[in-house]
Amino acid sequence: MVENNTHRPLNSDEFRGFVLTGNYARYIFIHGKDFTAAKMFALAHELAHIWLGKSTAPDLRFIRSSEDITEKFYNHVSVEFLAPQRLLQKMGTNQR
């Protein structure tokens, strides 16, 4: 919901997902109209936030840029989760 508009479509350029962590529950929001690959990446990224116990945006006014070093770390974790480098290297050497 943006202001009082509950029907405004969410722009995937603005965000693909976020997570809220608490003592009793964790909530992951994934942009449902995004591309499948983007949704998979967003889910892995938000799971990394949960594994380290850090909400994406406890206050949405202070969402971190994708250039932030912490967000880059979560992106790296996501890439390794979805396509581990050692497996890609192994597949590459087996196909030569």
Image (cartoon, rainbow, N blue to C red):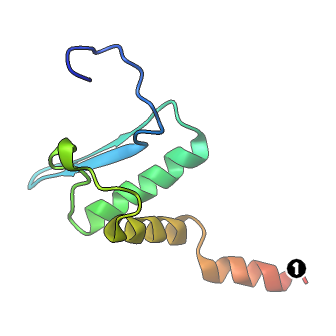
Toward the left, the furthest residue is 23
Instruction: Name the residue: 59% across, 48% down.
Output: 37
Q: Is residue 2 above or below residue 77?
A: above
Say left or right for 88 vs 92.
left
Can you give x and y, in whole percent of width and height, for residue 22 in the image? 12, 53
Say left or right for 65 vs 31.
left
Q: Is residue 32 above or below residue 56?
A: above
Residue 17 sits in quarter:
top left
The N terminus: image quadrant: top left
Toward the right, the furthest residue is 96
Can you give x and y, in whole percent of width and height, for residue 46 in the image? 36, 55
| In-front residue for pair 59/44 | 59
The residue identified by callout 1 is: 95
Q: Amino acid at mark 1?
A: Gln
Instruction: Name the residue: 40% across, 42% down.
Output: 15
Residue 89 sits in quarter:
bottom right
Q: Is residue 24 above or below residue 52?
A: above
Instruction: Name the residue: 15% across, 46% down.
Output: 59
Can you give x and y, in whole percent of width and height, for residue 88 in the image? 69, 76
Q: Secondary structure at mark 1?
A: loop
The C terminus: image quadrant: bottom right
Q: Is residue 36 above or below residue 83?
A: above
